Image (cartoon, rainbow, N blue to C red):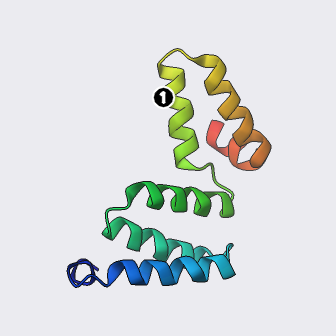
Amino acid sequence: LKQLAKLGRLMELIQRYREMVKASPDSVPLLESLAELEEAADEFQNAAKTRDRIAVLQNQVPRGLRDQAADLENKGDLKAACEIYLQICRDSPSAFAEEME
């Protein structure tokens, strides 16, 4: 992947995968490949969003939301942290229950 990046072909490949994901938005294998490509291209914010989408599809709590809630909780902003926890609970009650065990 790093060689593709050096050749300037990685972004082209990422665009192709993004188009395939648009056609099959619930395809975990496509999303996993896209996340790997985004990471290789140093597009870490996009990769994090893609990995959060994978977590939702696999009925897991998205890492980004979990980390955001934990950060807010650690900073003492309990109201904002609770709002995120409630959002996670609404989106995926079973994943939330597993996470809180």
Q: Is residue 10 visible?
A: yes
Q: Is label 1 in a helix, a strand or a loop?
A: helix
Question: Which residue is depicted at the point 69% across and 49% down?
Answer: 95
Q: Is residue 8 left or right of residue 76?
A: left
Asked if residue 3 is positioned above or below residue 51 in the image, the reply reads: below
Q: Quadrant of the C terminus?
A: top right
Tell me where residue 64 appears, x and y as whole percent.
52, 45
Tell me where residue 58 appears, x and y as whole percent.
65, 63
Q: How many marks?
A: 1
Question: Which residue is depicted at the point 52% across and 35% down?
Answer: 68
Tell me where residue 31 appears, x and y as whole percent.
55, 72
Q: Which residue is mark 1?
A: 71
Q: Residue furthest top?
A: 76
Asked if residue 64 is positioned above or below residue 85 in the image, the reply reads: below
Question: Which residue is depicted at the point 27% across and 81% down?
Answer: 8
Q: Quadrant of the N terminus?
A: bottom left
* Amino acid type assigned to the residue bearing label 1 in the image: Asp
Q: Which quadrant of the view contains residue 81?
A: top right
Tell me where residue 57 appears, x and y as whole percent.
67, 63
Q: Is residue 89 left or right of residue 3?
A: right
Q: Nearer the viewer, residue 59 or 27?
A: 27
Q: Is residue 69 left or right of residue 82?
A: left
